[in-house]
Amino acid sequence: MNININVNDNETLTEISVSGEIDVYTAPKLRETLLPLSEKEQVDMIVDLSGVSYMDSTGLGVFVGLFKNVRAHEGKFKIIGLSSRLQRLFEITGLADIIDISSKVEGDVK
Amino acid sequence: MDFRNMMESKYREILVNYLKDGSEQALYQSQKFSRNSMEDSIPPEEIVSMHKSLMIELFPDFTPEMQESFDILLEVMVGYGFAYREHQNLKHIQQELRTEMEIAANVQQTLLGTKVPSVEGLDIGAISVPAKHMNGDYFHFVKDENGSVSIAIADVIGKGLPAALCMSMIKYSMDSLPENRKSPTLVLENLNRVVEQNVDLTMFITMLYGIYNIENHMFTYASAGHEPGLYYNASEKEFTELTAKGLLLGIEKTTKYRQYEKEVSPGDMIILMSDGVTESRTEEGFIERETLLSLIEKNIHLEAQAIVHNVYKELEKLQDFHLQDDFTLIILKREV
């Protein structure tokens, strides 16, 4: 399975970086790794997708789930590092209007 | 006589022959014997036990130590026997599941079945092909009394069985909202509330709902995060995107949808699709939108149904006949 998930979880910030392909085969692993993290009260979560070469709608489903979970726990959720193809996916689905996304990697998050 | 009754004499024959002349023939027969035993669900420890009794009978000087050594082998084989029987059971269950899945796929076909309506002045083509057994894509046509047609095209994210079940729920809710059919935004807003209440966290639905008014040839539509459609202008020979903004169904309870209008000139086309069309992948990468446009253009002189069919066939070929995602393509062509 061609996916790598890096989690840096500390008191104030949960940083996640994903690389590889997110599709129907790798999405379950992504979901199992990230959903528990999103259940923390007032979590501040940043997901960096700059290493993601492909994502299909199943992958999008994982992020929708994450977003809803974080919101239900009054946390913050942000996605960074979107390629233009992924950016389009978030725009078509209207998610770009409700999820904080940014196409550039900010600061020195790797 | 069945295998079990004659298996001892059969085994004796193979063993005796082999011990006499060491022929390959006996080895071949023992392979066949093994296949027959499996077909008859003979556990491996039973074969070992049979071997032991035959050895005692054939060789009177077979020492007690040698005899007892077979007890160890027997014990070891018992474990294999369990694993084998479990395997048989699972194979059986798998077969049952496959059959059920096929039945479910048929039920879905019937439940979601929709006929492409025949409308004077409008040529309609539609194709929907699932990547697996169950289709997560969905389209639905309704022709109303004054001849106008409403079209829903949707994609449930999440694949396979759960997605298909969800689709059936959507179809059911659509059928129970007939009074709203005249307004795409109302349809989407109502469905959004249904989905928001019922569907699990990571599942969602995209839908484009449109009404083609046959009297003034106005196409009114709204989109819930669905792959944008295309408009083909026949006199300019040009494609443009049918812009529509709107959030996926099932994310926020109070989402409002915007309505858009497009006047369709004679010979022009409305093209609607699922993301299985634009997300088609080949070994080398994505099939770009330009490829899709050129495929449509190549077939543009044909009837709508022939266009969608040919485009599907060529995209399927580009993907090596292995669909990655459910594929749906609908074309509405205003007749000249």
Image (cartoon, rainbow, N blue to C red):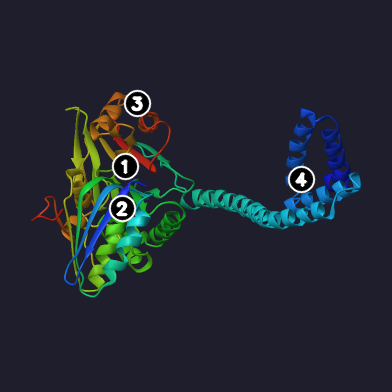
| Three-letter code, disc 4 | Ser
Q: Which residue is mark 3?
A: B302
- Mark 1 lies on a secondary structure that is strand
Say whether marks 2 and 4 touch (CB < 8 Å): no
Q: Which residue is mark 1?
A: B273
Q: Nearer the viewer, residue B167 or B213?
A: B167
Q: Earlier in the sequence, mark 4 or mark 1?
A: 4
Could you tell me residue B213's position as x and y percent? 28, 46
Circle 3 or circle 2, nearest the eye: 2
Circle 1 or circle 3, nearest the eye: 1
Say whether marks 4 and 1 touch (CB < 8 Å): no
Q: Earlier in the sequence, mark 3 or mark 4?
A: 4
Q: Disc 1 is attached to a residue of which chain?
A: B
Q: Which residue is mark 2?
A: A59
**Residue drawn at (50%, 48%) of the image:** B109
Say whether marks 1 and 3 touch (CB < 8 Å): no
| Three-letter code, disc 2 | Gly
Q: Residue A35 sits in which quadrant?
A: bottom left
Discs 4, 1: same chain: yes
- Cα distance between the residues tagged 4 and 1: 54 Å
| Three-letter code, disc 3 | Leu
What number is the disc on residue B37?
A: 4
Q: Residues within 10 Å of mark 3 (few under 14, many from 20)?
A: few
- Cα distance between the residues tagged 1 and 2: 20 Å
Q: Is residue B118 shown above or below A40?
A: above
Circle 3 or circle 4, nearest the eye: 4
